Amino acid sequence: MIKKVLIANRGEIALRVIRTCKELGIKSVAVFSQADADSLHVRFADEAVCIGPPDSARSYLNIPNIMTAAEITGVDAIHPGYGFLAENVYFAHICNDCGVKFIGPPGDVIRLMGDKSAARETARKAGVPIIPGTEERFSSNEELMDACESIGYPLIIKASAGGGGKGMRVVESPEFLFKAYQQAASEAQSAFGNDRVYIEKYLQQVRHVEFQILGDEHGNVIHLGERDCSIQRRHQKLIEEAPCPVLTPRLRQEMGRAAVKFARAVGYTNAGTIEFLLTPEGKFYFMEMNTRIQVEHPITEEITGVNLVKEQIRIASGLEMKHKKSFNTCFGHAIECRINAEDSVTFQPVPGLIRNCHFPGGLGVRVDTAIYPGYRVQPFYDSMLAKLIVHAEDRDEAIARMLRALGEFEIEGIPTTIDFHQRVFRDPVFTSGRYDVGFLVGWDHRQITSQTAHT
Ligand code: ADP
């Protein structure tokens, strides 16, 4: 069993991993930038090492400094969390080459899934449905135009090395094609150092439904049910729920089976997520695989009772995972919302000092956060302050609990998205469960119209 883990991350996920290490009797080492010296992950880890200045390129992304910290503290494993180096092939290889177990899948699997065109191709070969589209590189504009004509508009152009919604462009009709193609390629080049893009049909009224996977080094692969992550802004998740409110048991089995088949086909081990788009007719298509723990993993933990970080550490230790059968049935309903330090109208990040804060509690309420009264939100990192997770017997109770918990959540000193979430959980389209990834498009307009109608 792994005995000492360095957590190459910060914020709530670093704390999340430290907590599990403590429960497993494993020593933990935090790394931190100069801006994070007063952070909770530094306070609660057994040891902490400063790895550089605030700028993440020189600290949380600084592989030599992190490996040096691993060396001097004598850890036998590194947990990368999410973001930063979590899906960095070189980092995974360097860890393993240095005799420090990378808590995640093998580097080669990260490489394969990091190339989204290659992942699509792998899904196709494994017999998992993919969104109609093409990964071809085009030598002329005519060829590109012809290929797009046969896929049919609207289209979405995506970066092969993409993530975080960067390098994506929706194209409504042929006259916008070349410009969008160039823009997507150059955005991809500057964000990922790779200008390759691929094209998919832009599906309408779809839901983002993803399956949590666990695989161990003994050949066991299971799914732990799905999460619906359709409440998005600019293709980025804001609210997630599990199970998906419209999935039938039969479709869950079918999609879950496809997810497990895909994970097996790539030789997947550790925790991962397979993302699908689901159409109103119940057709589903593979979108991509994330080879790390996800921000939204707690809702799966709530409905399955499985501690995913514990399973990650056990699997990385070479142990068999605890559960050998997929979770086609789960307990109750869980919802997560991401509370960000943002203006709730413009969604612009607003860093600053949290003068005071109070977290909700009570039955079925979980708050994963690293903030505290007097904490200063730094401008250098992600604007997420907390994840509020509720679990209840059914969806209606989970929504009522979420609204109750949001009402108790107080953060003073900076603007947050708490009131935005309150409005979403009162929206009849959300409460009906019949929403899709376009839910927030034109939402403010809808809100204003319905408020006017009531006055
Ligand atoms: P990223 O990895 O950059 O977050 P994804 O490929 O996961 O990008 O897509 C993010 C979101 O973009 C999806 O959840 C969905 O809302 C939208 N999206 C992506 N591809 C399509 C598509 N072909 N049709 C419709 N919406 C799409």
Image (cartoon, helix red, strand yellow):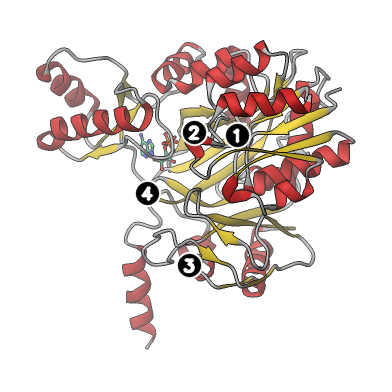
**Residue found 70% across the figure and 67% down from its top:** 359
Query: What is the x, y in percent for residue 137?
Result: 25, 14
Task: Inspect the image, locate mark 2, and give the three-letter code of the amino acid beneath it.
Answer: Phe
Instruction: Find out if the beta carbon at label 4 lies less than 8 Å from the nearest ligand 1 atom.
Output: no
Query: What is the x, y in percent for residue 380?
Result: 48, 49
Cα distance between the residues tagged 3 and 2 = 27 Å
User: At numbered mark 2, what does the secondary structure look like: helix, strand or loop?
Assistant: strand
Badge 2 density bin: few <14, some 14–19, many ≥20, Cα 10 Å: many
According to the picture, the residue beneath numbered tag 4 turns out to be: 234
* Of pointers 3 and 4, the one earlier in the residue sequence: 4
Q: Looking at this view, is 280 or 230 the one in front?
A: 230
Q: Is residue 426 left or right of residue 204?
A: right
Res. 156 image quadrant: top left
- Mark drawn on residue 420: 3
Contact? badges 2 and 4 (CB < 8 Å)? no
Identify whether 158 is placed above or below 394: above
* Of pointers 2 and 4, the one earlier in the residue sequence: 4
Task: Inspect the image, locate mark 1, and give the three-letter code of the amino acid beneath it.
Answer: Phe
Badge 4 density bin: few <14, some 14–19, many ≥20, Cα 10 Å: few
